[in-house]
Image (cartoon, rainbow, N blue to C red):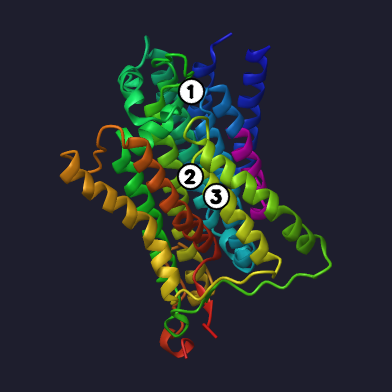
Amino acid sequence: MTDAPTLYGLCAAALIGLGVYGFIVNPQPLRKLLAFNVVGSGVFVLFGAIAHRGGALGWGGDPVPQALLITGIVVAFAATALAVALLLRLADEADSVTLADAAPAKPDVTARDR
Amino acid sequence: MIAAVNAGIALLLLGLAIWTIAARDTFAAIVGFVAYGLLLALAWVALRGVDVALTEAAIGGGLTGVLLIRAAAKLRATEAASNAERPALPTRLAAAIMAGGVTAALALVVLRTAGPAPTLAPEVAANIGATGVANPITAVLLAFRAMDTLLEAIVLLFALIGVWSLAPDHLWGGRPGARYRADPDGILAYLARLLPPLGIIVGFYIFWIGADLPGGKFQGATILAAMWLLAMMAGLADAPPVSRRWLRAALVAGPAAFIAVGAAGVGIAGAFLGYPEGLAKALIIVIEVALLPSLVLTLGLIMAGAPERTAA
């Protein structure tokens, strides 16, 4: 039986791979965003698992990487929120959210803006 | 026993991640992602990172989940057209091989790194007494690496400005999001009356206890913002127009107080964000208390989205 940091480290490696696959394969932008968040959480767990082997000193975990992780999670949320807002605006303007090269011509924006 | 629980959590995480990636229906995928976020919080507890677990559950699972679910509901009409663009089998195969390579390389790194990782924990332990707080993570966030936390608060503010700036011209300065209407006798309105008093106590508790035990302003602010969102979704409260001067002042007040304390440190302690001897705890509390309302407003308004209605 492996110890917890190794187990979660391997799990994180698999999560990152899954997220990368979903990010490439899934055509919907919202699903890409979801896959990107899976990659991000996998990176966080990998970082946490490797850092866990650091000094314990009765605290259990190393506080410096954990503080960085908290900052990382909040910043990831901020980036996701901005991406969602961009996506919703794109859907509003173009009535489709395709990322394909031959995107349909955008309707006249100024006319719609009244 | 613990090993079996950890193995179970890891397997469930993988299963939910596969579901999140592979589910046909976007809504179902996002529900899977929320469950994934909560399970991830358990994994953080197993890795002895309770502060990270709280943040992951509140922000990574909760707020991100609500954000994505609402976006999925709005984008439902575009889903079928997007799905038709699924790449052909060779592309999917190439992607799978590449993703497998990434996983294999990372797994190798995990298995091959031996010995304890480099750590700053002894330095934290040696100097935590000077900060007056007992939670080492709060000490790192607000004393040793306070610059990170300052910039983090500013990143959130920038994200909000980015979201707002996506409003169409004629709605600039208006109220964010749609006006929610819920049945005033329905379960949502009932919960929106019942939960906020409890949630506000829990939020302030987690905020205040952060000095000594796992918790802190980001986790507390998320819970408070969630209560505000609940009231908004039940139609009991409305988001203020983004052009309001008091709102903008309140949003900037927290980071501004943080910068002011930091700048004062240049004169008193000889470094930006340096705290003078004996005053560290007091200054940390000043920063935390100033940041909390700004963070609640910023998180709530990021969730509410770009202005969609005129200010009237």
Question: Residue at image x 32%, y 57%?
Answer: B256
Question: Residue at image x 33%, y 17%?
Answer: B122
Of residue B199 and residue B64, the one placed in the foreground of this image is B199
Does residue A1 appear left or right of residue B118 in this picture? right
Q: Chain of mark 1?
A: A
Image mark for residue A9: 1
- SS at badge 1: helix
Question: Residue at image x 63%, y 38%?
Answer: B38
| Same-chain status of marks 3 and 1 | no
Does residue B191 appear left or right of residue B140 in this picture? right
Q: Is residue B139 above or below residue B23?
A: above
Of residue B102 and residue B173, the one placed in the foreground of this image is B173
Closest to the camera, between mark 2 and mark 1, is: 2
Whether residue B24 is in magenta: the answer is: yes
Q: Chain of mark 2?
A: B
Q: Residue A63, can we see it?
A: yes
Closest to the camera, between mark 3 and mark 1, is: 3
Image mark for residue B222: 3
**Quarter occupied by the C terminus of chain B:** bottom right
Q: CA distance from mark 3 to mark 2?
A: 8 Å
Looking at the image, tell me whether mark 3 or mark 2 is earlier in sequence order.
2
Cβ atoms under marks 3 and 2 closer than 8 Å: no
- The amino acid on which the numbered mark 1 sits, given as a three-letter code, is Gly
**Number of numbered discs present?**
3
Q: Quadrant of residue B4?
A: top right
Does residue A66 appear left or right of residue B51 in this picture? left
- SS at badge 2: helix
Q: Which residues are magenta?
A: B23-40
Per the image, the residue denoted by label 2 is B217
